[in-house]
Image (spheres, helix red, strand yellow):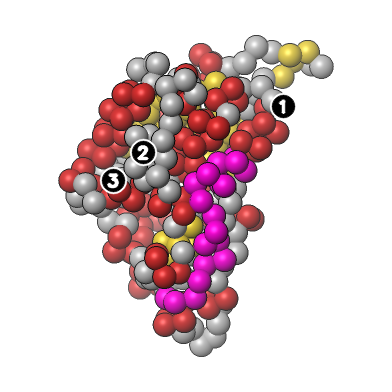
Amino acid sequence: MTAFTPIVLVHGLWHGSWCWSRLTGPLAAHGVPSVAVDLDGHGLAGRSPAARWSRPFDPAGFATEPAPSAAVTASSAAATLVAQIRQAGGGRPCVVVAHSMGGVVATAAAEQAPELFAELIYVTAFAPVDGRSAVDYLAGAENDGELVSRLLTADPAAVGALRLDPGEVSRHASVRQTFYHDVDEHVARAAIGLLGPDGPAGIPGEPLTVTRQRYGSVPHTYVVCTEDRAVPPALQRRFVADIDAVSAHPTAVVELATSHSPFLSAPEALAGVISAAYRARRSEPVTA
């Protein structure tokens, strides 16, 4: 039996492995196997603050309760991701796809274990590589126009997380405009219902330094989403420039005219980009 290592799909803050479900079918149609993972503090690896479920709902309690995931950092989440990639590929290198703030974790993981990465594909993702944290980029001019900050309902320093209230119906329109403005309304509503409230502040808050010898040895592709309202295109292109400054390989750049969530709005187009990289970088087959 011939087998290839699968694509490993890494989500961003507040999301989980569920967000890739509309992409895995198109990838399979291209002959590409895929595995979606939950980052530490997310999906089945996450817990919500108790105040989220209290009835009557207490907004003040929700805004002040410490996050169960407050101890998660970029490095600790990366260590978990390394183990997930190793398991998915049986120890052989995989093509890893990282979205949004999941790019921080994937960046740290590529520095920790570059031998497990056949290629790292960023999808409108953060890639802090020069000793700064993702938070440091948020204050830059390239981030002007982003809509994420208006969604936060708590002080990240106080609760240890970037906290949303996706259950508040009055906020649904803002959440959709930020993440899913070109996504079918019914799919967008379902996605909003699946969002977790907490993105661990230690993921964007930890400064990362990578090396040319380790992270820089990994080939990179960056998918720029030109209609993104969460990570502005100017900031995406800044990450490409920063990656190229430490990489032995120039970053391949592909542009999609989509929102922050092409895996929901344009899964066939995104699958085409990923499958092309997979065919170019996949590991040699093994016979079992």
In which quadrant of the rendered view does residue 82 lie?
A: top right
Q: What amino acid is labelled 1 in the image?
A: Gly
Q: Which residue is mark 2?
A: 131
> What segment is highlighted magenta in the picture?
63-81
The residue sitting at 36% across, 38% down in the picture is: 131
The residue sitting at 43% across, 48% down in the picture is: 206
Instruction: Measure how far apart labels 2 and 1 are at the Cα level.
Output: 31 Å
Residue 32 place in picture, x, y as percent: 59, 25
- Quick one: 105 or 4, which is closer to the camera? 105
Q: Are marks 2 and 3 in contact (CB under 8 Å)?
A: no
Instruction: Note whether 167 is above or below 205 in the view shown.
Output: below
Q: Is residue 78 magenta?
A: yes
Residue 45 place in picture, x, y as percent: 63, 55
Residue 165 place in picture, x, y as percent: 43, 69
- Quick one: 147 or 264, which is closer to the camera? 147
Q: Which residue is mark 1?
A: 90
Q: Which residue is mark 3?
A: 137
